[in-house]
Image: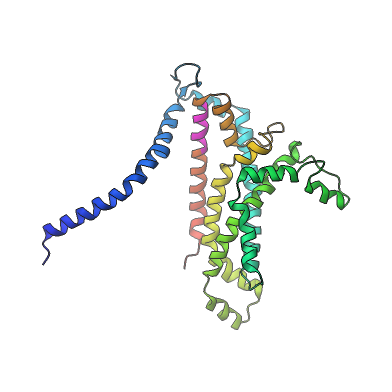
Amino acid sequence: MISSRNISRRQWGEWLTAYAFLLPSFIVLSVFIYYPVVYAFGLSFQRWRLLRGPAAFIGLGNYEFLFSSEEFWQALWNTFYFALGSIPTGMAVALLIALLLNRPLRGLALYRTAYFVPTITSLVAVSVVWMWIYHPDVGLMNYFLQSVGLPGVRWLNEPGSAMPALILLGIWRGMGYNVIIYLAGLQNIPQHLYEAAQIDGANRWQLFRYITWPMLTPTSFLILIVAVINSFQSFTQVHVMTQGGPLGSTTVIVYYLYQQAFQQFNMGYGSAIAMVLFGIILILTLIQTKMLGSRVHYQ
């Protein structure tokens, strides 16, 4: 018979073993995630220009300047513009492709691999390739437009077309990831639901409307939250392709943070931008969870 003292010792041993395995991850997270976040929060209340003297506490000065800055509001609008332009369209296209790839087709593995390749390709390399596609003189995009009698566009050099060009790249880049997630969701739908509905005379649209879409709501909810977070953290394609231009039309909030913190070395102000960005993403995630979480259909 095992005494309570022996059980307690065994439990303590299991707990210590578990914490020993968790300790390396906790140390890494503390050094590279938790401590920088806390340090940046404290730095957001200080005026500190790197290599230009010590930091000075100014309270909410950085935040007051931030919310009165036209550049910040333009960057925030550009970020919402990018998110609203890329997320709904990207999800709809990914779902359509996933529905097609979920059917028995010859060479199906090749199609699935082809759609996932952009996801695992370096975004810097992808951005360079798309700069060539958008080139006003020798780019593929203008070649197709001119082949059907439409005038060419200076895609990355005009304020009205630069952000749509980045949105198109964002949709293409994120499609593979979304397609794979939707495919996993589609393959988890029990087939007997379709069989029962077909016996009752349901057509294809009714099968999608009353079975496929409700059963995919957890998948769509996951993709939506991840896509919103990724959209608000977009940086690489802006840095490589437009540097925030022309006329600030593609300066998203993370690129604005980069300009302030690492080009102008205004670290305190940059930290305030980072804290506001963190707050925006947190609020949007909570709103999505509150408004859409109750509508998600779990099995």
Question: How is the structure coloured here?
Answer: rainbow
Horizontal side, residue 116 vs residue 272: left or right: right
Q: Is residue 157 visible?
A: yes
Q: Main secondary structure of the magenta part?
A: helix
Left or right position of 96 against 156: left
Q: For residue 36: magenta? A: no
Does 255 sit above or below residue 47?
Answer: below
- Residue 276 sits inside the magenta stretch: yes
At 63% across and 28% down in the image, what residue appears? 70
Above or below, 188 against 9 in this view is below
For residue 11, side relative to residue 36 (left or right)? left
Percent x, y of residue 258:
57, 32
- The segment highlighted magenta reads 269-277
Q: Quadrant of the N terminus?
A: bottom left
Percent position (x, y) of residue 284?
52, 46
What is the x, y in percent for residue 285?
A: 50, 48
Residue 135 vertical position relative to residue 71 in the rendered view, above or below:
below
**Which of the 4 image quadrants contains residue 96?**
bottom right
Which of the pair 117/73 is nearer the observer?
117
Q: Nearer the viewer, residue 52 or 299?
A: 52
Q: Is residue 68 visible?
A: no
Instruction: Classify residue 2 by image quadrant.
Output: bottom left
